[in-house]
Amino acid sequence: MSDVKYGLAGVMTDDTAVSKVVPETNSLTYRGYAVQDLATQCRFEEVAYLIWNGELPNRAQLHAFEKEERSLRGLSDDLIAVMKRFPKEAHPMATLRTAVSFLGLEDKDVGDHATDKLYERSMRLFAKIPQIVATDYRLRNGLEPIAPDNSLRFSENFFHMCFGKVPAPEVIKCFDISMTLYAEHSFNASTFTARVIASSLSGIYSAVTGAIGSLKGPLHGGANEAVMHMLQEVGTAKNAKAWMLDALATKKKIMGFGHRVYRSGDSRVPTMTEAYKKMVDILDSDEAREYWEMSRILDETMVAEKGIYPNLDFPAGPSYYLMGFEIPMFTPIFVMSRITGWTAHIREQLEDNKLIRPLSNYIGEAQRPVVPMAERA
């Protein structure tokens, strides 16, 4: 009888001080703070500082942090030229993966693994990834890239680089909330991928590139895109309950529900759902209200029939859509947030590094001799 834990379910592989789901409160915490409190009371830059430094910043620390981030914005002419040659039909996560790898090529001290260098590179990725995502969006739509505006905050600047304008503060706050909620989640698939690669001393760019590859999958980060495609397939609120019942009866894969860690509901969902409803109210359109009603009915039906609750991707996908983002951009936006958690874990891994190399349970043929070619049937 094998004691293999398939998918590493329930296996603890290392220590971390970055985040934890507290069972008693069913709350995801970053450095001890409940994520729902951080999302509503702090800007994303404050949360990024917390994840990297262990404490929330005071005014002076936040000002210095924002000043450094803004100073590192901007992509090289070489990278933009390469991005212009990317196939327009390529998924934005594939182009982002390649662009981040290119950033590694441009780092002249990439072989230096000193702790201070890791922090500098983390900040560099944090500052540049939003412009990569925005530039790719504009290029694939036949538009010229828009340079960053260093007078704007992180989320404001992203909208500026995508659309050439900054929306109302209420929209920015909804976006900021999503950034905080997506920033970190312990040893999820992409974070564990990053730590495995980092453990071989391959470097931060290799680790982040690998993490992007992991996040791209529909069972991980790509689920927020799949949720929006699902809503479009459902079509109208009046179809929602019948669609869900049929999907359950035919064992169709339903995206945006369930989670490996949470059993009584994802603690991030209520806060993101409030942001989703806020976007519906801001737009005040028939389309927005239809998506909201569809989501509500799908949620209620799944919980009533199976007792399975939605995860963060379920309200995040349509929220991004209502903000004006194309569906293939949803997971790259996730990367803009999760780069904070990934790099925190990469630095944590390298503080007391042990090469991650698990064992396997062999179920193949027993050792046997090679049969000469002339004797093989």
Image (cartoon, grey):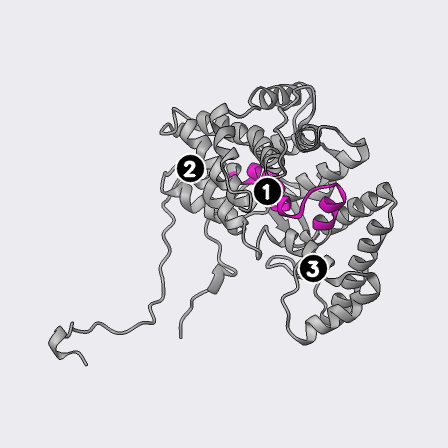
Quadrant that contains the N terminus: bottom left
From the top left corner, tell me how far across and down residue 75 is, in percent.
53, 26
From the top left corner, tell me how far across and down residue 178 is, in percent.
70, 42
Residue 199, label in figure: none
Q: Nearer the viewer, residue 27 or 256?
A: 256
From the top left corner, tell me how far across and down residue 59 is, in percent.
69, 21
Q: Which residues make up the magenta segment?
A: 317-342
Residue 330: within the magenta?
yes
From the top left corner, tell me how far across and down residue 280 is, in percent.
83, 46
Q: Give the amino acid at mark 1.
A: Pro
Q: Taking 359 as reference, is 87 left or right?
A: right
Q: Earlier in the sequence, mark 2 or mark 3?
A: 3
Which residue is the site of mark 1? Answer: 332
Q: CA distance from mark 1 to mark 3?
A: 19 Å
Residue 131 is drawn in which quadrant?
A: top right
Q: Give the amino acid at mark 3.
A: Met
Q: Nearer the viewer, residue 325 or 19?
A: 325
Which residue is the site of mark 2? Answer: 350
Q: Nearer the viewer, mark 2 or mark 3?
A: 3
Q: CA distance from mark 2 to mark 3?
A: 40 Å
Q: Could you tell me which residue is drawn at 76 percent across and 46 percent down?
A: 271
Looking at the rendered structure, the secondary structure element under dot 2 is helix
Residue 60 is drawn in which quadrant?
A: top right
Picture layout, residue 344 above or below residue 74:
below
Residue 345: within the magenta?
no
Magenta stretch: dominant secondary structure: helix
Q: CA distance from mark 2 to mark 1?
A: 26 Å
